[in-house]
Amino acid sequence: MDAVQPTLVTRLNADWEWLCADRGNCDRVRSWMLGADVLDEDQTPADLGELCTLLRKGASRALLGVSTGLH
């Protein structure tokens, strides 16, 4: 497997910052998570980056068999 090019990582980081800056993107992802009963309304962050971090932590814990509070 080839190493990831630094320009690709830079571009992905810039895209991620742009996506996180748009409140509508977080609202959209948040509504999907709430609609799928993946998260409870009171535990769902309003920031897309924080929401994704919460989901990654939950996924990691689920793989380890640890209770996360996620449905």
Image (tube, grey):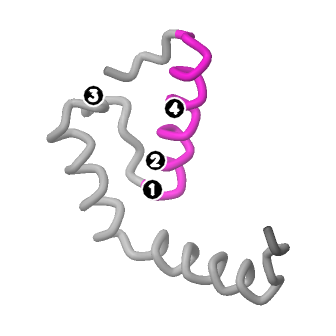
Left or right: 40 with respect to 13? left
Give the foreground label among 1 and 4: 4
- Please name the residue that numbered disc 3 is placed on: 40
Mark 2 vs 1: CB contact within 8 A: yes
Q: Position of residue 10 (x, y in %)?
A: 74, 83
The alpha-carbon separation of the residues under discs 3 and 1 comes to 15 Å
- Please name the residue that numbered disc 2 is placed on: 51
- Amino acid type of the residue that numbered disc 4 sits on in the rendered structure: Ala
Q: Main secondary structure of the magenta part?
A: helix
Classed neighbour count for the residue bearing mark 3: other residues with Cα under 10 Å, few (<14), some (14–19), many (≥20): few
Left or right: 27 with respect to 17? left
The alpha-carbon separation of the residues under discs 4 and 2 comes to 12 Å
Identify which residue, 2 or 51, lies in the foreground. Answer: 2
The secondary structure type at the circle numbered 3 is loop
**Mark 3 or mark 4: which comes first in sequence?**
3
Classed neighbour count for the residue bearing mark 4: other residues with Cα under 10 Å, few (<14), some (14–19), many (≥20): some
Locate the N terminus by quadrant: bottom right
Q: Which residues are magenta?
A: 47-66
x 48%, y 69%: residue: 20
